[in-house]
Amino acid sequence: MGEKVVADRFDLSDRRRYRQKLHKCLEGLGQLLEEKRFDRPRNLMGLEIELNLADAQGQPLMVNAEVLQRIASSDFQTELGQFNLEVNIVPHALSGRVLDQLAEELRTGLAYADRQAREAEARIVMIGTLPTLTPGDLTVANLTDVDRYRLLNDQIMAARGEEITLDIEGVEHLTTTSESIAPESACTSVQLHLQVTPGRFADVWNAAQAIAGAQIAMGANSPFLFGHELWRESRIPLFLQATDTRSPELRVQGVRPRTWFGERWISSAYDLFEENVRYFPALLPLRDEEDPQRVLAAGGVPSLPELTLHNGTVYRWNRPVYGVMDGAPHLRVENRVLPAGPTVTDVLANTAFYYGLVRALADDPRPVWNRMPFAYAERNFDAACRHGIEAQLWWPRSGRGSGLVRRPATRLVREELLPLAAAGLDAWGVEPADRDRCLTVIEERCRRGVNGASWQASAYRSALESGLDRDKALAAVTRAYCDRAADGAAVHTWDGGL
């Protein structure tokens, strides 16, 4: 979200006027799409990683303001909780040695940030959800002291009219309540951006939706929350419930949650922006005088600030993004599926798998979304979140046959998706050696049946069997995770000893 000032109050008349302005923004976007005024394709990709801060014992530390002051780099920014940071990597052309370049930049930046964090007796932890978090850590008092976070909290809680209920049933069953959206800060992710033309957008978004289940199956890294072992990627239901503005009555009526997988394949980027305005009331009002139609009539490019701000409060797992760069409008697909970590090696493997697979599927003359109902993509996503690398996923039959077949995610990835990802990276022009190094990590996860979530769960059981109680076992797992992650080797190579 941008830094522009939003209103403190948002009454009924404000909402009516704001909705009118959002529709004007939609009209402006529609005109830009019709006139084909978007930036030429530059194959630009971007990468953001949300991070945690913990002490030497693996417990969360609420010191992001001090750590950011020490880091003193615009590449690192605040996030929702005081134990969170975010690192942003500048956009890169998706070609050549880009994967090697990203790895070097991430390792250098994170190592520097960790050295600065240690001056504040903290360490940086790249993980989906910090296992040692407790409900007492996730309170409104521990939100980062930034106006937009406080206002977002106030607006979501006012829309609900009651406490947030977290109810996640997995290996164990967690039920608890929160008086704020602070539990959302437990969800630390990787966001992958891809700039696309309007004509290409629908194919790329549909492809990203189709592979979301496979992404989670390979990359799950969030099996614990508040001392409970839940889903292999518990971050997904946690984020949904922590940002839910619906009352129980509205949920029963079928009102859509703001954290949303979607419900159909699309034919245009406009479909998603229009749905966001139609289905979701604005949370953060923005006072901006831009008239999109007047700007367009003068030959300019509108920034559509109300639409972009509103779009940022609808948490699709694959989100459409509109922006203006160097005076030209552009569109991006923001992939928000993956958890952070465990290591830079793992993050880059997940990154290569995603960009390669999306390219191959978007280029396919027989698109997977023409052969698989959307409901099965959502079913795959849910199965992968629950079961991780042990999930069973639906996919169209190979060859010219029709219908779907359900099989282990590891088999689907090794036999079909990894070759597609390799072909997609070739189409981008990625260096073959970098391609193979990254995709081999995914192949080895499949072969060994190990990713971040399965390693954490296995280490936790070993800790319990050694006689540690639940809290001490989770702390031991966190410390062991940090120590191994610091070595940089991919998680499938880690030993299970504590």
Image (cartoon, grey):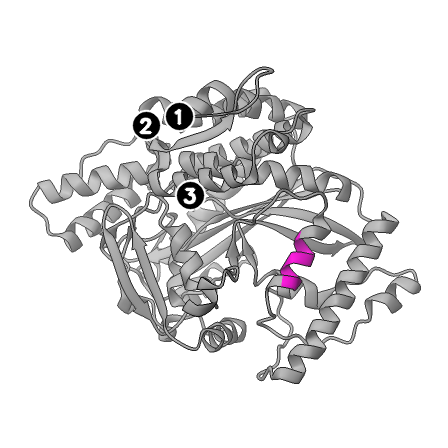
Q: Earlier in the sequence, mark 3 or mark 2?
A: 3
Left or right relative to 232: residue 301 = right
* Mark seen at residue 410: 1
Q: Which residue is mark 2?
A: 449
Q: Which residue is mark 3?
A: 382
Whether pointer 2 and pointer 1 mark residues with C-beta atoms closer than 8 Å, the reply is yes
State the image coordinates of residue 166 (x, y, percent, origin top left). Answer: 33, 62
Residue kind at label 1, given as amino acid type: Thr
Q: Nearer the viewer, mark 2 or mark 1?
A: 1
Q: Is residue 374 above or below residue 411?
A: below
**Quadrant, the C terminus:** top left
Q: Which residue occupies 65% across, 63% down? A: 278
Task: Check the image and name the residue furthest to the left.
Answer: 467
Q: Quadrant of residue 434?
A: top right
Q: Which residue occupies 45% across, 63% down? A: 251
Q: Which residue occupies 41% across, 60% down? A: 241
Q: Residues within 10 Å of mark 1 (few under 14, many from 20)?
A: many
Q: Which residue occupies 37% across, 71% down? A: 142
- The region drawn magenta spans 272-278
Q: Nearer the viewer, mark 3 or mark 2?
A: 3
Left or right relative to 355: residue 246 = left
State the image coordinates of residue 294 (x, y, percent, origin top left). Answer: 88, 69
Task: Check the image and name the residue furthest to the top.
Answer: 399
State the image coordinates of residue 384 (x, y, percent, origin top left). Answer: 40, 38
Left or right relative to 183: residue 199 = right
Q: Is residue 89 magenta?
A: no
Q: Earlier in the sequence, mark 2 or mark 1?
A: 1
Q: Is residue 495 above or below residue 69?
A: above
